[in-house]
Image (spheres, rainbow, N blue to C red):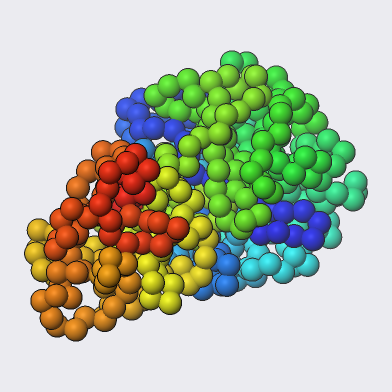
């Protein structure tokens, strides 16, 4: 969720683990999921969308997929795949979990937009066998308090033989605490209990269960403004004690704890609300230490406008089926190598790199089509001005309408090569000025010769979504 007068509700972010061919039950339980699936090798993300001026805002369930858990491809052209039909008619803070029978359950906050006075005692729930169809939509009633039920998620409590359904609510303490109900079917739930109350506002609980004999709960703390961890040797309500250092980048919420499937690395993701909707990640090789190191922003890219995300591992077959059902994007975004918080966009038809997020967000979406002057090259067609392409004029890049001339076609054609600063990225050489490359200078895009390390970094971009 976005900023709120009392506190800032939210949800978890994308998974910071790499693909793997095997998974232990303990690691699987750390995600709150069911039995191990040896074939899990990819990831699905669920989220809703918001953008600064509302152009990219939608309160339905969106999906993205990844093979490495870091670089994400939105599905269905970043449009929702299902939207609630009851309650507020919208959702926030979705959570996807594979249940112990191998199917999925989707949970979400019953809230559309930022009407923080809408205190729903219910949450949205769907069942799904494959995340291509969503069935048995329902809204279980969690409590009778005059408060909300924010950011629900679940984990398996083996000692009870039930799922624990965790969410944020204001109880008799007068501040947000983490509540829990127990359920076997996400339809009938037990009476609510206080799961965690350190004496100040806490929201967005996220669990890692059964890690070297301990259980970990990370949450957004109003006391620090960041993400803090608590731990316990049991899963009993009231047993968790805060222990970690707080991490934040601006105002940070929506923690997600994930263990890499291929190393001893743990990732902690956070979603910021100052600025709105930017994701950051930290890493640690010792969860018990409670200290974290920032992850380089070059290493991860989340879907445009994504907010408060959830991740579940999926098989290679499920990944392929999701892409086949919902489709890959018809557009790309380009991220700057040495300013990875900035993306290539047009503004007043001038090309530049600007800090994400911004509206219109479609200014940063491009169709990479065969070069207008040479089909072996590439031209950049604007998504929101499809009759216009990026072209250079007096060495400056701008968005001009096609005029049918050979000069225009050549000015608008570039050749993609290995990134000059990092070969896993990309650089773009001018077709008719082959000693010059697209680079940013003072955040404006132009074509220039490349000679120095700074030039090479300025001329290097990632092509993603």
**Is 152 on the left-hand or right-hand side of 438?**
right
Which of these two is toward me, 402 or 366? Answer: 402
**Is 183 on the left-hand or right-hand side of 408?**
right
Point out the image quarter for the N terminus: bottom right
* Residue 66: percent from left, percent from top: 36, 45
Point out the image quarter for the C terminus: bottom left
**Is 318 on the left-hand or right-hand side of 31?**
left
Up/down of 71 relative to 369, above or below: above
Which of these two is toward me, 61 or 285? Answer: 285
Which of these two is toward me, 282 or 116? Answer: 282
Q: Please name the residue shown 59% across and 15% down the image.
A: 212
Q: Please name the residue shown 34% across and 39% down the image.
A: 453
Up/down of 171 relative to 352, above or below: above
Up/down of 324 relative to 235, above or below: below
**Is 308 on the left-hand or right-hand side of 201?**
left
* Residue 187: percent from left, percent from top: 61, 52
The answer to whether one can see residue 158 in this image is no
* Residue 335: percent from left, percent from top: 39, 52
Q: Please name the residue shown 43% across and 21% down the image.
A: 263
Q: Please name the residue shown 30% across and 38% down the image.
A: 422
Instruction: Kindly give the residue lying farthest to the top in the view shown.
Output: 212
Image quarter for residue 280? Answer: top right
* Residue 180: percent from left, percent from top: 72, 42
């Amino acid at each position: 969720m976005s900023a709120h007068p009392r506190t800032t509700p939210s949800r978890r972010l994308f998974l910071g683990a790499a693909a793997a061919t095997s998974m232990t039950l303990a690691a699987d339980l750390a995600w709150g999921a069911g039995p191990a699936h040896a074939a899990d090798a990819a990831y699905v993300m669920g989220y809703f969308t918001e953008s600064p001026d509302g152009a990219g805002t939608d309160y339905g369930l969106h999906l993205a997929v990844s093979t490495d858990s870091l670089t994400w491809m939105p599905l269905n052209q970043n449009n929702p795949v299902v939207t609630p039909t009851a309650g507020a008619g919208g959702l926030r803070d979705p959570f996807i979990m594979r249940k112990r029978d191998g199917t999925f359950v989707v949970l979400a906050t019953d809230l559309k937009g930022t009407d923080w006075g809408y205190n729903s005692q219910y949450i949205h729930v769907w069942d799904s066998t494959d995340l291509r169809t969503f069935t048995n939509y329902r809204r279980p009633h969690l409590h009778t308090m005059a408060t909300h039920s924010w950011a629900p998620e679940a984990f398996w409590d083996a000692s009870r033989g039930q799922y624990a359904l965790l969410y944020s609510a204001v109880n008799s303490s007068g501040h947000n605490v983490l509540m829990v109900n127990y359920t076997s079917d996400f339809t009938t739930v037990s009476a609510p209990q206080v799961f965690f109350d350190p004496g100040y506002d806490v929201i967005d609980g996220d669990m890692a269960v059964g890690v070297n004999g301990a259980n970990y709960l990370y949450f957004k703390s109003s006391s620090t403004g960041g993400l803090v961890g608590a731990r316990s040797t049991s899963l009993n309500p009231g047993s968790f004690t805060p222990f970690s250092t707080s991490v934040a980048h601006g105002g940070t919420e929506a923690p997600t704890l994930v263990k890499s499937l291929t190393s001893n690395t743990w990732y902690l993701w956070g979603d910021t609300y100052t600025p709105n909707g930017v994701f950051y990640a930290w890493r640690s090789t010792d969860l018990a230490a409670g200290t974290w190191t920032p992850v380089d922003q070059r290493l991860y890219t989340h879907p445009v406008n994504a907010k408060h995300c959830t991740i579940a591992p999926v098989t290679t077959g499920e990944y392929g089926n999701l892409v086949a059902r919902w489709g890959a994007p018809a557009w790309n975004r380009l991220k700057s190598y040495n300013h990875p918080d900035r993306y290539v966009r047009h503004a007043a038809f001038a090309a530049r790199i600007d800090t994400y997020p911004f509206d219109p967000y479609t200014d940063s979406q491009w169709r990479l089509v065969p070069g207008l002057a040479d089909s072996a090259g590439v031209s950049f067609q604007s998504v929101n001005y499809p009759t216009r392409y990026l072209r250079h004029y007096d060495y400056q890049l701008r968005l001009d309408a096609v005029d049918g001339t050979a000069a225009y076609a050549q000015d608008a054609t570039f050749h993609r090569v290995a990134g000059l600063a990092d070969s896993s990225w990309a650089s773009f050489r001018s077709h008719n000025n082959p000693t010059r490359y697209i680079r940013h200078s003072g955040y404006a895009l132009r074509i220039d010769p490349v000679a120095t390390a700074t030039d090479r970094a300025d001329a290097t971009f990632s092509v993603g979504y």
